[in-house]
Image (cartoon, rainbow, N blue to C red):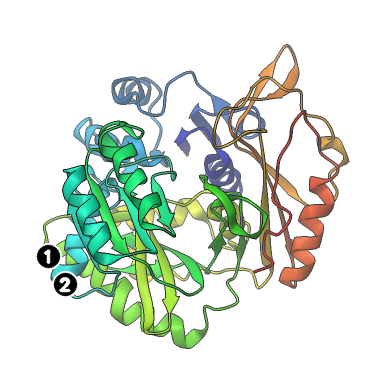
Amino acid sequence: MKVLVIGSGGREHAICVSLAKSPKVDKIWCAPGNGGIASVAECVPVGATDIEGVVAFAKEHKPDLVMVAPDDPLALGMVDALEAAGIRAFGPRANAAVIEGSKSFAKDLMKKYGIPTAGYAVFEDSAAAVAYIHEQGAPIVVKADGLALGKGVTVAMTEEEAAAAVRDAIEGGSFGKAGARVVIEEYLTGPEVSVLAFVDGKNLKTMPSAQDHKRAYDHDEGPNTGGMGAFSPSRFYTEAVAAECMETIFKPTVSAMAREGRPFQGVLYFGLMLTPKGPRVIEYNARFGDPETQAVLSRLDSDLFDIMNAVIDGRLGEMDIRWKDDAACCVVMASGGYPKAYEKGKEIAGLDRVRDSFVYHAGTALRDGKLVTNGGRVLGVTATAPTLEDAIRKAYGDVRRISFEDAHFRNDIGVK
């Protein structure tokens, strides 16, 4: 079987590696891929949001399955376009991917169906939004409504900081069209947990829990990033919490989307906060998270290709998906300056000295036979072990064997 994976980051590298383990898969393409993905798949020069280009490639090369991994092409309707061309595709259609593409849609859905989340209000006028902030007080959370590469959230500890974030988004256009509307949310406290689930429109199967680290610097300081590392499982996501989430959040969300005429098929990501009053939804993603995927798929003990086909065919309820007992830790090595300005083209050394981890490539390229940096997040050094503490130790041991100019990573992934 032949598979085409769409995307170019660490998540896509993890997906390609998992698919390559399937005895049914004998050919993988990745569009556009990266320097590390090239070792397991044939990278093709088609952009991840080039819907016409992807459809044309699929028509010519006839993959048995196209896996659309990133948020942007899902929101733009790539799965719809592939299906319209008679091509089998994994991922939600655009009318379901809106659960991530519009935070106001997601909040309104939760409100309508009684799914627990933070209190909120939606604004397109900055003056009205700032007035609401002063009425509510701080701390308070400001979110760009649309897709902003994981960077459109400001957890403001003062009213002034929140007001500045609103003006930045609506008036300053810092997130483009994605920030023309903002969602202002109640500030919640508690451990954060990420739970990804395979969903076939009616049935869902959750994956092991994980925890992302969004802030750029140690101790959760600095600006939000796309994610500086992740570990699995969460220390706080007990069987009792999982059972509560299944009945109050997971099943109701899948049911709500079906009732709205937007059946969700693909991977649905639940970003949760375990508050003193119970679990609350912080966000939904309409796809595998990054870097949670690197940690979670490292623990998969079933055939990912089989799972994807069961999702497409509505047979997920028949699947027995197995996971390894080992814990996993993924430490992201980023370019200096990320998530703000950073330089590319720095030569990467030391990958041949890695002992205990698998290194997923996020922002790398091959130039003149050398592997160089080509993005903000460069590598995801991922280790598994019987205990989380051992996985963390292994991952950091290998992080320190890898080098490139101005490399930046957090030292506390998995500690909290």
Amino acid type assigned to the residue bearing label 1 in the image: Arg
Residue 254 image-quadrant placement: bottom left
**Is residue 407 toward the left or the right of residue 121 in the image?**
right
**Is residue 50 toward the left or the right of residue 81 in the image?**
right
Label 1 packing within 10 angstroms: few (<14), some (14-19), many (20+): few
Name the residue tied to disc 2.
113
Q: Residue 105: tell me if it is visible.
A: no
Give yes or no for contact between labels 1 and 2 (Cβ–Cβ under 8 Å).
yes
Q: Is residue 153 above or below residue 196?
A: above
Q: Is residue 251 above or below residue 278?
A: above
**Is residue 100 toward the left or the right of residue 346 in the image?**
left
Amino acid type assigned to the residue bearing label 2 in the image: Tyr
Residue at x 52%, y 40% (from the top left corner): 12
Residue 135 image-quadrant placement: bottom left
Name the residue tied to disc 1.
259
Disc 1 secondary structure class: helix
Where's residue 9, x and y in %?
Answer: 54, 37
Where's residue 265, x and y in %?
Answer: 29, 55
Residue at x 31%, y 65% (from the top left corner): 137
Where's residue 282, x and y in %?
Answer: 37, 64
Among all residues in the image, which is located at the extreme top? 368
The alpha-carbon separation of the residues under discs 1 and 2 comes to: 10 Å
Quadrant (top left, top right, bottom left, bottom right) of the C terminus: bottom right
Among all residues in the image, which is located at the extreme bottom? 240
Disc 1 or disc 2, which is closer to the eye?
2
